[in-house]
Image (cartoon, rainbow, N blue to C red):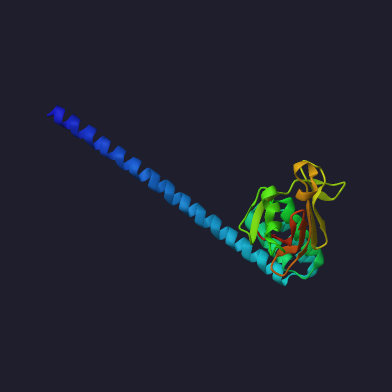
Amino acid sequence: MKYNLKRRIVKLFCVLFIVILGLGPVAIVAQSVDDVLYNSGQKSEKIREVQQALQDGDQITQYALVEALLKEEDKALRRIGREHALFSINPVLQSMAIESAFATNAQVRIVISNPTKPEALGWLEAAGGAQDGQTGFVMMPVGSFDAASSCWLDPVFRRCRFTIIGNTVQFGFYANGGQAINRAQAALTLQPDGQVRGAFISGFGQAVMSIDLKE
């Protein structure tokens, strides 16, 4: 009798232990979901407030808010500030947004299209990119910012790779010991679609270069 009672107690304990283990993760998941929903709601409310202030605030408020947003660690908030500035007609905000894109990204996606001849896309391969004979792209390191030159430097040749002047970006590239055929340059201007775009010239030929600053 005692033996059977002992077995029942042990069995009951095991069942309770299994139930506790089973409920434990469920309770944790439920709490985590609550946290996620709460944080999501808080963030959504904050985003709505920011968007409202950008639309209804005066010029000074918009300028200060965009400046703060562009320094945000939260990528979603930073993107809101950048896109607002990129699509603004205010040249000061546009320039701030362009600078932010290069200051907060280790690399940018350069697209080359509309070559005057297929060979003009050869530069992409020299730069480590890819092309299909009509268009192509390369992920280009931004480099480090040099305050003295007010530009982002080519990491090897220590010459300006990206220079921002107002709503334009000057681009310069050097490779393979600086041989002329692998050099390239471009003058890119901010467009209504949030990209900087313009004429591109390299030792391989001419084309159009663009960088989507919303990425």
User: Which quadrant of the view contains residue 40?
Assistant: bottom right
Asked if one can make out residue 127 in the rendered structure from this viewpoint, the answer is no
Measuring from the top left, give residue 132's x and y in whole percent: 61, 58
Horizontal arrangement in the rendering, residue 190 relative to residue 41 (left or right): right
Given residues 54 and 99, the one toward you in this image is 99
Given residues 4 and 42, the one toward you in this image is 42
> Which residue is located at x 50 percent, y 52 percent?
35
Horizontal arrangement in the rendering, residue 46 relative to residue 199 (left or right): left
Given residues 130 and 45, the one toward you in this image is 130
> Which residue is located at x 63 percent, y 57 percent?
76
Given residues 18 and 76, the one toward you in this image is 76
Measuring from the top left, give residue 21's x and y in whole percent: 34, 40
User: Which quadrant of the view contains residue 176?
Assistant: top right
Outermost residue toward the right in this view: 148
Measuring from the top left, give residue 185's x and y in whole percent: 79, 55
14 over 110 or under it: above or below? above
140 over 88 or under it: above or below? above
Quarter of the figure that contains the C terminus: bottom right
Quarter of the figure that contains the N terminus: top left
> Which residue is located at x 43 percent, y 46 percent?
28
